Image (cartoon, rainbow, N blue to C red):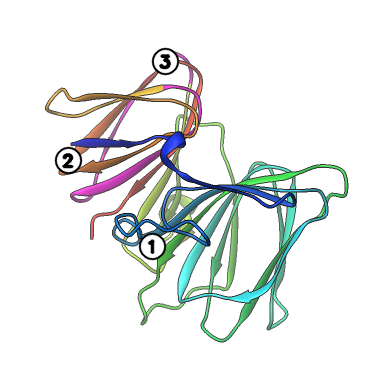
Amino acid sequence: MITPRTARQCGKADYGWLQARYTFSFGHYFDPELLGYAALRVLNQEVLAPGASFQPRTYPKVDILNVILEGEAEYRDSEGHHIQAQAGEALLLSTQPGLSYSEHNLSKENALTRIQLWLDACPERENPPLQKITLAALPQQLLASPDGSKESLQLRQQVWIHQIKLEEGQQLSLPLHGPRAYLQSIHGTVHALTSAKEKEALTCGDGAFIRDEANITLLADTPLRALLIDLPL
């Protein structure tokens, strides 16, 4: 089953220095029916103005995945770890209770555009505080996984995150590990097809809940970039 969550339905914010679209409840946007989806707690698409920053703040024990679409950012924690990431890279922060984390747009002229995901972390799992990979120009790339397979970022949760990049008319089928997944279009239009021949069209910024499917087939109507988040638990 596929249930769309269109960009128009999402929560929105415009603070001048920050423009954001929230898939789930976040900040001032609250919907008791949308507090997350399995281990996925946050899926935000955000634009930080030139020179803007998120000042140091603490988080629950979550893995924070940032996919940088445009610009360059720096991330720091209160233990002195720091790393920079730019367009074409993905960064994973393995947050710890009691530590604070900041994010800075390094450019004084250009905006920073990124997608951010928060995933619940298993309490007994510990990973490096900062991880980074380069995004590949492939139809499918495993960005993050529980064991870091295929040179992916290593999560503290049973979740698999794929980047999808398809040309117009190209088709891709992916198996899923369990009964739940979430599909997020970054740009482009796609038809998502299920084994029951259910068909749902998504366009730029749209998402979709996927339930009780062993695999999903994506057919790009235009050049497509998307994330597929496989959430079996």
Disc 3 residue type (three-letter): Asp
Q: Residues within 10 Å of mark 3 (few under 14, many from 20)?
A: some
Q: In the rendering, at what x and y percent does residue 30 appear?
A: 42, 58
Q: Tell me where the magenta segment starts and ends, as one range.
A: 167-189
Q: Depth check: give the residue in front, 143 or 39.
A: 39
Image: 148 above or below 99: above
On-image quarter of the C terminus: bottom left
Q: Is residue 170 magenta?
A: yes
Q: CA distance from mark 3 to mark 1?
A: 33 Å
Position of 13 with respect to 190 (left or right) is right
Query: What SS does tag 2 mark?
Result: loop
Q: Which residue is mark 2?
A: 214
Q: Which residue is mark 1?
A: 147
Say the numbered circle drawn on residue 221: 3
Q: Return the disc, 3 or 2, that comes first in the chain's sequence.
A: 2
Between marks 3 and 2 in the image, the one whose residue lies nearer the viewer: 3
Q: Depth check: give the residue in front, 90 or 185.
A: 185
Between marks 2 and 1 in the image, the one whose residue lies nearer the viewer: 2
Q: CA distance from mark 2 to mark 1?
A: 21 Å
